[in-house]
Image: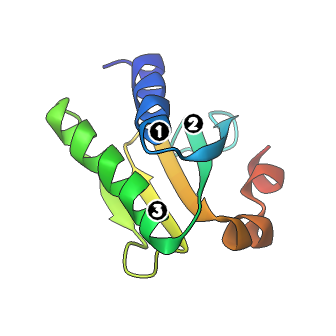
Amino acid sequence: MDHQQLKTFVIEKIEDLKGRDIVDLDVAEKSSVTETMLVCSGNSKRHVVSIAENIVVQAKLAGNQPLGIEGKETGDWVLVDLGDVIVHVMQDEARDFYQLEKLWG
């Protein structure tokens, strides 16, 4: 899966579980770690974790082994590292607090 296909795939998996306010940040010029950060919101801890787990399971099924997943224990902010695409699934409070869009936008 190339970069654009991976990004489209992840957005579809977020939408499958009703993740909202998806923002696509191109960070290729600002980061040596990844090309794209996708940020989205979930309604509760359980919803945030479910969205992240869906991305991980579906990526594995498609042959893209995630490099890591962080934050599942708390569910306020879960990060899924897929290499070229890093996904941040956040509750609104965490998203408002950390303002990743401003930081990386």
Q: Considering depth in this image, is 29 or 52 the residue closer to the camera?
A: 52
Left or right of 101, for residue 27: left
Disc 1 marks which amino acid?
Answer: Val
Q: Residues within 10 Å of mark 1 (few under 14, many from 20)?
A: many
Q: Residue furthest right?
A: 102
> Picture coordinates of residue 21 (x, y %)?
69, 44
Q: Is residue 55 visible?
A: yes
Residue for badge 1: 85
Q: Quarter of the image for the N terminus: give it.
A: top left
The answer to the question of whether label 1 and label 2 lie on touching residues, with beta carbons closer than 8 A, is yes
Q: Secondary structure at mark 3?
A: helix
Left or right of 76, for residue 55: left
Res 25 quadrant in image:
top right
Disc 3 marks which amino acid?
Answer: His
Which residue is pictured at 48% across the width and 18% down the height? 4
Which residue is pictured at 53% across the width and 57% down the height? 89
Residue for badge 3: 47
Residue for badge 2: 36
- Give me the C-alpha separation between circle 3 and circle 1: 21 Å
| Mark closest to the chain's N terminus, 2 or 3 | 2
Which residue is pictured at 42% across the width and 37% down the height? 16
| Mark closest to the chain's N terminus, 1 or 2 | 2
Of marks 3 and 1, the one in the foreground: 3
Q: Secondary structure at mark 2?
A: strand
Q: Is residue 26 visible?
A: no
> Picture coordinates of residue 103 (x, y %)?
79, 56
